Image (cartoon, helix red, strand yellow):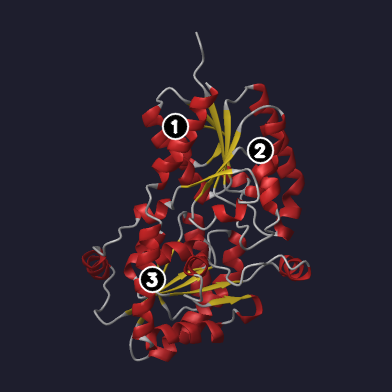
């Protein structure tokens, strides 16, 4: 009896786990007997994937941080690659995590296993020459953003735009005001309370660098808007991270009215303004049409290498600005990312309602452009590739 095809997926962190789960759910609708295995997290496992490894084993960020974990990561990748070849897999799909997935895909392709990659690396920002090695590593690339395929025109790589799944999941029309008022009541907030959401990152290294700066910024902001009361929100998905953030607030800014929620979405629905670590959350904030300031501090050694080798190629570092092709939101990085500068950027949003109105309009336009049923588009592309292999 012929065995059903085996699809091997590899997600490198929490965002990839969510992408992979949506992909699996839509694939299973088209091919319920499809065997799916690989590296993922709880969402992919719940969707029906046999997890050979947990994606948290791969969640390392920054050049210096990667170097510390490199022997372990290389050993894991070698073992994973051999298991894929020995099984063997019908198709391999790497989900984001390009530094782990693309070299793996190149080796698998050499061994005769077809490969795809889901989420284009940020070639518009870092090392654009990578387009050629990416094209050699995979047979097809699934891009989240409409501007990305143009970077691969000089290669033979097939690119398909899926749109962004978070643009699909977050409502375009603002039905949030009623929910917002309900949450305000639940948290015993006053009608005139000003809500600032702090999102210092999901990784421990990010939170350690940014939480003290963000909390000090919130204290300055509170003093600047007095006598209006400031309520500070944040969000972390796991209990350990929530405890860590609350402990930092109690030690560094005990006078703040501070609430840590379970879901970033809730913190974004409720707030008036956002201070966020540069990353995917700035795009989610855009989809909620909330004005924001993006900040980041790299590990000192990583920052030194970035400057020395001139690795940054884009004039903008956050997706809202890349998508808008302009300075839609303030980007404040490294040595400039200190409480005084961050607070001033936040206060400028508060004092310029016409700027907020323009931002909300552009945010809605970008949101609409990226609502393409991403999970369905990605699943269709993977299913069509599988069909050609069976």
* Residue under the point 41% across and 56% down: 370
Q: Measured from the top left, where is residue 49 in percent x and y?
A: 49, 32
Q: Secondary structure at mark 1?
A: loop
Q: Seen in the image, is 86 located left or right of residue 170? A: right
Q: Nearer the viewer, mark 2 or mark 3?
A: 3
Q: Which residue is mark 2?
A: 105
Question: Which one is in front, 194 or 29?
Answer: 29
* Label whose residue precedes the other's in the sequence (2 or 3): 2
Q: Which mark is residue 362?
A: 3
Q: Nearer the viewer, mark 2 or mark 1?
A: 2
* Residue under the point 26% across and 70% down: 184
Q: Measured from the top left, where is residue 58 in percent x and y?
A: 63, 46
Question: Which one is in front, 76 or 332?
Answer: 332
Mark 3 and mark 1: Cα distance apart in space:
38 Å
Q: Seen in the image, is 380 located left or right of residue 121? A: left
Q: Which residue is mark 1?
A: 48
Mark 2 and mark 3: Cα distance apart in space:
37 Å
* Residue under the point 67% across and 26% down: 85
Q: Measured from the top left, where is residue 159 in percent x and y?
A: 54, 45
Quadrant location of residue 68? bottom right
Q: Seen in the image, is 69 located left or right of residue 319? A: right
Question: Vertical placement of 148 versus 19: above or below?
Answer: below
Question: Vertical placement of 375 versus 62: above or below?
Answer: above
Q: Measured from the top left, where is residue 135 in percent x and y?
A: 65, 44
Mark 2 and mark 1: Cα distance apart in space:
23 Å
* Label whose residue precedes the other's in the sequence (3 or 1): 1
Quadrant location of residue 174? bottom left
């Amino acid at each position: 009896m012929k065995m059903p095809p085996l699809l091997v997926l590899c997600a490198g962190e929490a965002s990839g786990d969510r992408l992979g789960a949506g992909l699996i759910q839509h694939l299973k609708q088209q091919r319920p007997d499809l065997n799916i295995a690989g590296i993922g997290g709880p969402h992919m496992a719940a969707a029906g994937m046999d997890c050979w490894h947990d994606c948290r084993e791969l969640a390392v960020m920054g050049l210096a941080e990667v170097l510390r974990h490199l022997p372990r990561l290389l050993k894991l990748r070698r073992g994973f690659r051999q298991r894929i070849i020995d099984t063997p897999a019908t198709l391999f799909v790497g989900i984001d995590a390009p530094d782990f997935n693309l070299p793996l895909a190149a080796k698998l392709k050499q061994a005769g296993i077809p490969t795809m990659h889901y989420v284009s690396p940020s070639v518009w920002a870092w090392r654009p020459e990578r387009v050629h090695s990416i094209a050699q590593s995979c047979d097809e690339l699934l891009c989240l953003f409409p501007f990305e395929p143009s970077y691969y025109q000089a290669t033979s790589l097939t690119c398909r735009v899926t749109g962004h799944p978070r643009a699909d999941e977050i409502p375009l029309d603002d039905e949030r005001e009623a929910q917002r008022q309900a949450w305000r009541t639940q948290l015993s907030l006053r009608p005139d309370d000003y809500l600032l959401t702090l999102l210092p990152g999901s990784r421990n290294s990010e939170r350690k660098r940014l939480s003290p700066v963000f909390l000090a910024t919130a204290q300055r902001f509170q003093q600047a808007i007095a006598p209006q009361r400031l309520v500070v929100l944040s969000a972390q998905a796991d209990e350990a991270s929530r405890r860590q953030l609350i402990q930092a607030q109690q030690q560094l800014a005990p006078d703040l009215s501070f609430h840590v929620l379970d879901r970033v979405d809730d913190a974004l629905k409720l707030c008036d303004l956002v201070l966020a670590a540069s990353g995917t959350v700035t795009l989610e904030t855009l989809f909620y049409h909330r004005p924001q300031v993006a900040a980041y501090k790299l590990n000192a050694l990583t920052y030194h290498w970035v400057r020395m080798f001139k690795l940054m190629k884009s004039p903008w570092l956050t997706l809202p600005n890349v998508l808008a092709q302009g300075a839609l939101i303030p980007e404040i990085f490294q040595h400039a990312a200190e409480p005084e500068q961050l607070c001033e950027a936040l206060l400028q949003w508060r004092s310029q309602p016409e700027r907020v109105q323009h931002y909300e309009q552009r945010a809605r336009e970008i949101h609409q452009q990226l609502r393409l049923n991403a999970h369905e588009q990605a699943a269709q592309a993977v299913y069509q590739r599988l069909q050609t292999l069976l």
